[in-house]
Image: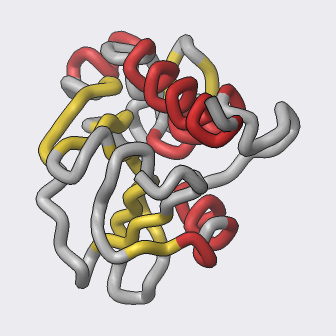
Amino acid sequence: MPYQTLSKKWFINTALAYLGTPYIWGGDDPSGFDCSGFVVECLKTAGFLTEKEDYTANGLFQKYQGYQINSPRKGALIFRVNQDKYAIHVAICLDYQFKIESVGGNNQTISVPLSWDDNAFVKIRPINYDKKTHKVAYLFEDGM
């Protein structure tokens, strides 16, 4: 198997392994993730980022702007952008319909009990893709 195909497999499998992990604002490890902390951890596992690299949703959006594609596909990053083209959320596409993301909290969700109160954790949701508010980046070279 080519390296990139193995990387995508690790990327998706890592994301799925974190289902149910609490959403914690600013969280970047398995004790609790915010949206970008979750995606960064998955990218590190797949070898796209070093252990020292850390990014916000917008930082990832800026880093991977050259990898944009027109629609969601398995393994792609999907960014929600505001009217100023600033990424305010990032998730991972499982296919063209579903994504996995750390979602449901806000800047007040700073502990596990608060994440459960907010129903905030890593979960799978429909994409509801809108070209005006979403941008997609695909990092893999497998053509899939």
Query: In the image, residue 19 lies at what x, y percent?
Result: 34, 17
Residue at figure coordinates x 74%, y 35% from the top left: 47
Residue at figure coordinates x 27%, y 76% from the top left: 133
Which quadrant would residue 30 be assigned to in this image? top right
Residue positioned most to the bottom: 84
Q: Is residue 37 visible to us here?
A: no
Q: Which of the two residues, 53 or 141, is positioned nearer the viewer here?
A: 141
Query: In the image, residue 129 lies at what x, y percent?
Result: 18, 65
Count of numbered labels shown in the rendering: 0
Horizontally, residue 71 falls left or right of residue 67, namely left
Vertical order, 137 against 113 (above or below): below
Model colouring: secondary structure
Residue at figure coordinates x 72%, y 44% from the top left: 48
Q: Is residue 61 visible to us here?
A: yes
Horizontally, residue 87 falls left or right of residue 95, namely right
Query: In the image, residue 46 lies at what x, y percent?
Result: 66, 32
Query: In the image, residue 108 lies at what x, y percent?
Result: 40, 37
Residue positioned most to the front: 1
Quarter of the image that includes the N terminus? top right
Vertical order, 27 against 67 (above or below): above
Vertical order, 120 against 75 (above or below): above
Q: Which of the two residues, 42 or 112, is positioned nearer the viewer here?
A: 42
Which quadrant would residue 12 be assigned to in this image? top left
Residue at figure coordinates x 26%, y 27% from the top left: 123
Which quadrant would residue 60 be assigned to in this image? bottom right
